[in-house]
Amino acid sequence: MDRRAFLQLAASAATASALPHWAWSNAPSLSTHPFALGVASGDPAPDGVVLWTRLALADAAQLQTAHTVRWEVAHDARFAQIVQKGQAPALPQLGHSVHVELRGLQPGRWYHYRFMLGDAVSTVGRTRTAPAAGDLPDALRVAFASCQRWEHGHYAAWRHLAADQPDLVLFLGDYIYEYATPKNAADLARTHSLKLATTLADYRDRYALHKSDPALQAAHAACPWAVTWDDHEVQNDYAASAGRGGDTGSFLAQRGAAWQAFYENMPLRATSLTRPFPDTRWDALQVYRLLRWGRLAHIHLLDARQYRSWQACRAPDSGSAGAVRGGSCAELADPARTFLGAAQEQWIDAGLAADAAAQDATRWSVIAQQTLFAQRHYPSGTVGTDSWAGYPAARARLLQSVTRHAPRNTVLLGGDIHQNYVCRVHADMDRPDSAVIASEFCGTSISSRSGTTQDKVDAVARHNPHVLLARCDQRGYGLAHITPARWTTTLRVVDDPMRADSGASTLARFVVEDGRAGPVQA
């Protein structure tokens, strides 16, 4: 489908109350449960939230047909007190996904929702709205997670996260992995039969695989999510419009397919589709955005993949970015290189300025992004080129923005590296005696392996005094309990990612006090 047509179709479907009469599916006779991929909600606002589902259809004729899905929102899980209801189209051109953008709800309260098609009824999801803009709520519980490669482990972490009952989940990238199952599957938790994803059908199948997991479905149904992406939603280590192999046209077609599948499978608002684009490139999903939680927290959710410069000193045909020695790669220091793109840099700078201008109104400024922000000086002297370290000028600009505007409290959240890191963020990364201006919690993966050893990680920590904790050997998620006076991060890890029924424990707990940058172990 032409990309402009896709944008128009998706935007109209998100706001439609029903299909035209000629397109009704007339309560189809279903051979499979149509809601086998679960339900989700996302991007809560004071007056509404996005509801999502995607039909799982087996019959060939039904796959080519548009269907009318009914939905209900209620105060209670038994739906005795329904507050809104309606119907929405599930179109084959959009992978039979459904996006319902609710408005007119009450701020700061929980709701229940469900979908129906014919006689089939979905799982009941639980969601909530954000507080009113002027409110200062007593607390916010945010879970943050990333990186859930199917073969590397089961999703027990999601089961424990749902039991922790967060108000909001921040997913920070690598929801799917594009790879086929490795030929040597001896040490894998599970396998799949899907090929390397390159087409829209491939990516749709990959999301269906991940969403078939009951623990992940339970986490989606437990509360609203806010999602961003990293590289594996498209291709390992891609950067903006460039991917592996140097064939720009082929890669842009693949990226467009992957981005469409991402929208189809995530609880995103249609406004994420409205970015204009000047030419044939599909530059049309804006996933960086601001979520306001009253006066307690402003969450600046970034996109560090779509606008970045090609990795320094990386060959066009290289399958991954790798690492370089700083002295042998002059390109690293080029001030024109960007991690976020000029427009997003200006956007986050303006957002931090707005937070600081209203210090009494914004207690916590949260920068939620894909990877580790703080510096890691390696004993070997190498520099990883696919993280913030590979874009030192861009990182310095964001540090300068935090320093210049000085929001009341700044906390960075990250993922990607499959390791738990807790860091003090200094105004000058190369000067440990410079002022501490922010706190950072970079979470480990849900299931993806780290690819390193704890001995190596310990050596890195010894060379970086701002690193307070560094662990690569455990999978899990982070849980932040945020109050006006204190931010508490609990790092939760599973006992055995190879087991779907694994238990979980607390690795560590750190506290950031209001007005005092830098985590302290509790």
Image: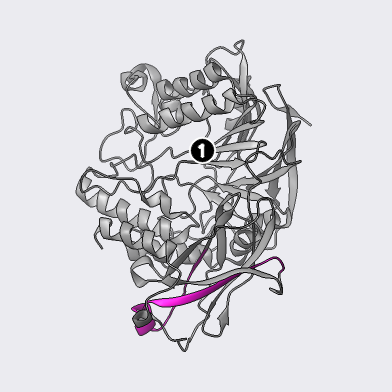
Residue 469 percent coordinates (x, y): 67, 31
The C terminus lies in which quarter of the figure? top right
Q: Is residue 146 left or right of residue 328?
A: right
Identify whether 81 is placed above or below 172. Answer: below
- Please tell me which residue is depicted at 47% across the width and 54% down the height of the picture: 268
The image quarter containing residue 385 is top left
Circle 1 residue = 369
Q: Amino acid at mark 1?
A: Gln
Residue 143 percent coordinates (x, y): 65, 47
Query: Helix, strand or loop at disc 1?
Result: loop
Look at the image and tell me whether residue 453 can be seen: no
Task: Please name whichever residue, 149 or 433, is drawn nearer the observer in this view of the structure.
Answer: 433
| Residue 442 lies in the magenta-colored region | no
State the residue lying farthest toward the right: 522
Q: Is residue 300 left or right of residue 10?
A: right
| Region rendered in magenta | 52-76
Look at the image and tell me whether residue 291 can be seen: yes
- Please tell me which residue is depicted at 51% across the width and 54% down the height of the picture: 149
- Please tell me which residue is depicted at 42% across the width and 55% down the height of the picture: 270
Circle 1 residues within 10 Å: few <14, some 14–19, many ≥20: many
Task: Please name whichever residue, 54 or 240, is drawn nearer the observer in this view of the structure.
Answer: 54
The N terminus lies in which quarter of the figure? bottom left
Residue 82 percent coordinates (x, y): 66, 71
